[in-house]
Image (cartoon, rainbow, N blue to C red):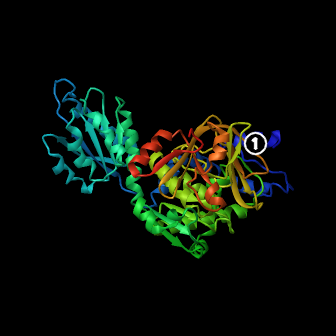
Amino acid sequence: MGPRTRRAGEAALFGMVHHIPEKNSMSNPLTRRELLGTAAVGGALLASRLAAGAESTSEMRTWRQLPPARIYKVFAGRTGDAYLTRPTEELAKFDKYFAEIEARLGDVKFIGGDLVPPAEAGQVAGKLKDADALLIIHLSGHGGDAPVLSKLIDVGLPTALFSQPFSGHGWMYFPQWHKQGKKVVLLPTSDWAEIEKVAGLLRAAAWMKQTRILAVGWPHGTPAACSADEVKKRLGADLVKVPNERIMEAMKAIDPKAAEAEAQEYWIGPAREIVEPTKPEIVESARMYLAVKELMIQEKAQGICSVHCMGNPRGCLTFSKLNDLGLVGACEGDIDSTLTMLLFAYAFRVPGFITDPVIDTAKNAMIHFHCTSATKMDGPSGKRLPFRIRTQTDSRGGVALEVDNRVGQPVTCAKLVNLDTMLVCPGKIIETGTSPLACRTQFTQSVADARRLFLDWGADVIKGDVMTLLHRVVFYGDHMKAVQDLGDLMGFKVREEGGVA
């Protein structure tokens, strides 16, 4: 990219200009006349770009909204001015803090509030049937705590137990639940912020049970994940196969003007640069997004994957916007990655980038690349990353994205396989790239030991074809510890891929 193009692209980020190709540029077929024509609505488009978060929120209201996760709270132990006993006034402080968490997250609701004793654990257990999860605040107690609280743990809800220092000696008996494989996260800490973090994880477990996933054509991945019965049994989600013809028919019903407006407002206007695709090709991709949107609304779905995404038009822009909105769109029918992305979207409010990674021991790194990428990698309320509109690399056709990711950003590479094991590899983005040998969006992640990662690839738990073994999903943020907690709550194992044996 030359200096003139780069300057124009940088200015476009602030809504001032759009990159205007030379008149007869074969690499930039979107003409000056087309661009100037679309710029006629500049004021409105600038406002829409500045209010991107509000736009996403407004559009999401057209989808079925999942209800707040209902977390039943129980206070365990006596209070008062006594040795190793939490003061009574802490109960009101906890309730105030729970209300603050509800306001900040907006999608959890704390219910209950029983104090055990005087309430009996068995009676409280009977009240949990309408709850999605359980939170126990340990106030005081000694050796008899575990048998009493086991009546609550054994209900089987995803459970978190918060136990501050100086709350008695009963904490010694709590790890037995973890060793027994109970769905419980133990929080022996003075940091109340850990309660908010675990509330997000409890939300994910609850929402997966209300999730519908559309597999266009058929799902592709590990055998358990491809089984609708197994997905329902282990995660509670519905996996529904739909024929690609439904999307093709839905596209015919989309108003061409609506597709053009969508293309202009969400893609052409905000793009740093448009390289190969023509405006009609971008509009056709926007038309596909609007058709998939209608299909998902009709089916009350939160996620979609497609083995037909390399067709005409390709699904790259469709899946990118779905992920920007906090939903999930996954390419190549990859159901394992779809489920991984749903879990992270629910727990951490971030989209995933499905990648075809390669290992570079010279840099002690893993290089990620693919042609489908979200532009709001910080989450639906975050700013969009700079992007260029390109073709899909290996086919040299269609419409895809080259997204500029943030160097220095902590990331978590992950994949849930066989519905029972989450492979995880944390690191940071150390550089971005534009190699013509790889897909459009590219960045390099640091790893603990690249050689070990290379030799450990798949951790002996993935059996399948190239895509199943290759694909991983990268998320902004270091979620290593939180994913381990999520695994405890939902009953899957967590393994650091390439970690110390």
Element at label 1: helix
**Whole-percent x, y for residue 409 in the image:** 60, 36
Classify residue 429 by image quadrant.
top right
Q: Is residue 135 left or right of residue 352?
A: left
Residue 78 at least partly seen:
yes
Residue type at numbered disc 1: Ala
Q: Does residue 271 appear anywhere in the picture?
A: no
- Which quarter of the figure has residue 165? top left
For residue 237, side relative to residue 477 (left or right): left
Q: In this orientation, which residue lies closer to the viewer: 388 or 494?
A: 494
Q: Quadrant of the N terminus?
A: top right
Name the residue at 60% across, 55% down.
Answer: 320
Name the residue nearer the viewer: 147 or 164. 147
The residue drawn where x is 45% and y is 43% is 484
Q: Nearer the viewer, residue 462 or 231?
A: 462
The residue to which callout 1 is attached is 8
Q: What is the count of numbered marks?
A: 1
- As drawn, which residue projects farthest toward the front? 501
Is 101 on the left or on the right of 455, as rendered? left
For the C terminus, the quadrant is top right
Q: Name the spot of residue 382 as percent of width and height, x first.
A: 54, 43
Instruction: Name the residue at 45% across, 41% down.
Output: 482
Q: Residues within 10 Å of mark 1 (few under 14, many from 20)?
A: some
Q: Is residue 133 above or below residue 281?
A: above
- Looking at this view, name the residue that lies furthest to the left: 118
Quarter location, residue 237: bottom left
Q: Which one is in front, 222 or 27?
A: 222
Q: Is residue 366 above or below residue 298?
A: above
